[in-house]
Image (cartoon, rainbow, N blue to C red):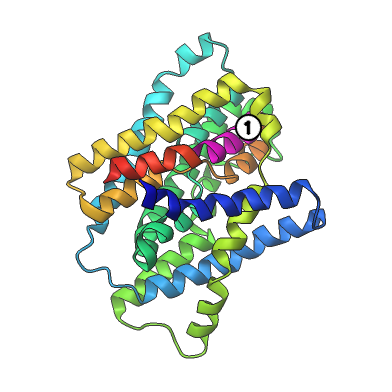
């Protein structure tokens, strides 16, 4: 347990540092938006492309791991959709339900990559790539469909994406593209070309610290306090129920060892700030979503070490 805490402490320390720097306005307001865009569009893709392209993935049960993560995501999402009428009776409206559903299944890939690298070293990057490719397009699809189904009346026809936009944005995600390109280079034995490979490797070193500080800078703790009950319920779904579902799915699909550990950890991640963007653009309860992102990020400092212990 002490070793796990010492590995994860720097991850959450950088998140806290980002929050403090933003709160004290050490940098201008535009700095953090630029830092997040740089990380999302270049630094993280560079890190993943170089690391996955040259990784040794022999002996890792990649397909069963992906199947377990996707199955658990579908089960949790399906169960919540089945409970929608009952939740409506408890006062959860359409926009609130769409945000709740998204908060229960959407992981923060920045934190996920950092945690898996902290625990498994470079071997954590291929595992993160499998989880990203298996989960991120799926949660994007579910999140957008949920907003189209339950929150669309609150969105204007000019701003609400259509059904055709439920999958394409996920496939254009630069992090997913980098994972797929790295996997192709690995499988084909091509490797990274001279000059380009070392350049991307150097750039990738900045991805984790800058990305984690950007996560902290985006936290809205007041939003979590304003909707305590709904935020707490959604946080339990994401940080407790989702990892349990993955544990069961790993058992069903025969996922063991390092891949099982990485699967459970990925399921126990806090919610991504992307969820807030989707809710804002598509008529969801954006205030609730901001609170869920903040609450799960803070709570994960406690729950993630427990998830590591469960994952073995």
Badge 1 marks a residue whose secondary structure is helix
User: Left of 122 or right of it: where is 259?
Assistant: left
User: Residue 255 appears at what percent x and percent y?
Assistant: 21, 49
| Residue 52 drawn above or below residue 214 | below
Give the overall secondary structure of the magenta segment: helix
> Which residue does the numbered mark 1 point to in the structure image?
291
Q: Is residue 126 left or right of residue 110?
A: left
- From the viewer's perspective, tell me whether residue 284 is left or right of residue 23: left
Q: Which residues are magenta?
A: 288-300
Closer-to-camera residue (93/291):
291
Residue at 61% in and 26% down: 95
Camera-nearest residue between 216 and 203: 216
Q: Is residue 302 visible?
A: yes
Q: Residue at x 56, y 22 (%)?
A: 230
Position of 140 relative to 187 (above/below): above
Left or right: 247, with 194 as reference point: left
Q: Quadrant of the N terminus?
A: top left
Point out residue 192 in the picture as x, y percentages from the top left corner: 42, 83
The crowding category of the residue bearing disc 1, from other C-alpha atoms within 10 Å (few below 14, some 14 to 19, many at least 20), is many
């Amino acid at each position: 347990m002490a070793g796990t805490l010492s590995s994860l402490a720097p991850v959450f320390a950088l998140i806290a540092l980002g929050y403090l720097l933003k709160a004290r306005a050490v940098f201008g307001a535009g700095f953090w938006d630029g830092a997040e865009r740089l990380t999302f569009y270049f630094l993280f893709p560079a890190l993943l492309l170089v690391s996955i392209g040259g990784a040794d993935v022999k002996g890792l049960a990649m397909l069963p791991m992906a199947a377990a993560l996707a199955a658990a995501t579908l089960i949790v999402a399906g169960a919540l959709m089945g409970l929608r009428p009952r939740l409506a009776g408890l006062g959860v409206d359409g926009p609130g339900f769409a945000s709740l559903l998204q908060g229960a299944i959407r992981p923060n890939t920045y934190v996920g990559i950092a945690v898996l690298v902290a625990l498994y070293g470079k071997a954590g990057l291929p595992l993160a790539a499998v989880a990203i490719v298996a989960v991120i397009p799926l949660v994007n699809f579910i999140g957008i469909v949920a907003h189209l189904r339950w929150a669309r009346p609150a969105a204007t026809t000019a701003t609400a994406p259509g059904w055709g936009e439920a999958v394409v944005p996920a496939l254009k995600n630069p992090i997913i593209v980098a994972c797929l390109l790295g996997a192709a280079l690995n499988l084909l034995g091509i490797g990274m070309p001279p000059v380009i490979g070392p350049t991307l490797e150097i750039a990738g070193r900045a991805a984790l610290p800058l990305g984690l500080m950007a996560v902290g800078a985006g936290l809205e703790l007041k939003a979590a306090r304003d909707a305590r009950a709904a935020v707490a319920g959604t946080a339990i779904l994401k940080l407790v129920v989702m990892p349990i579902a993955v544990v069961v799915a790993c058992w069903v699909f025969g996922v063991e060892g390092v891949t099982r550990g990485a699967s459970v950890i990925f399921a126990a991640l806090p919610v991504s700030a992307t969820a807030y963007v989707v809710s804002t653009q598509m008529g969801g309860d954006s205030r609730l979503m901001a609170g869920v992102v903040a609450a799960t990020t803070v709570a994960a400092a406690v729950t993630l070490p427990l998830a590591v212990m469960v994952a073995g």
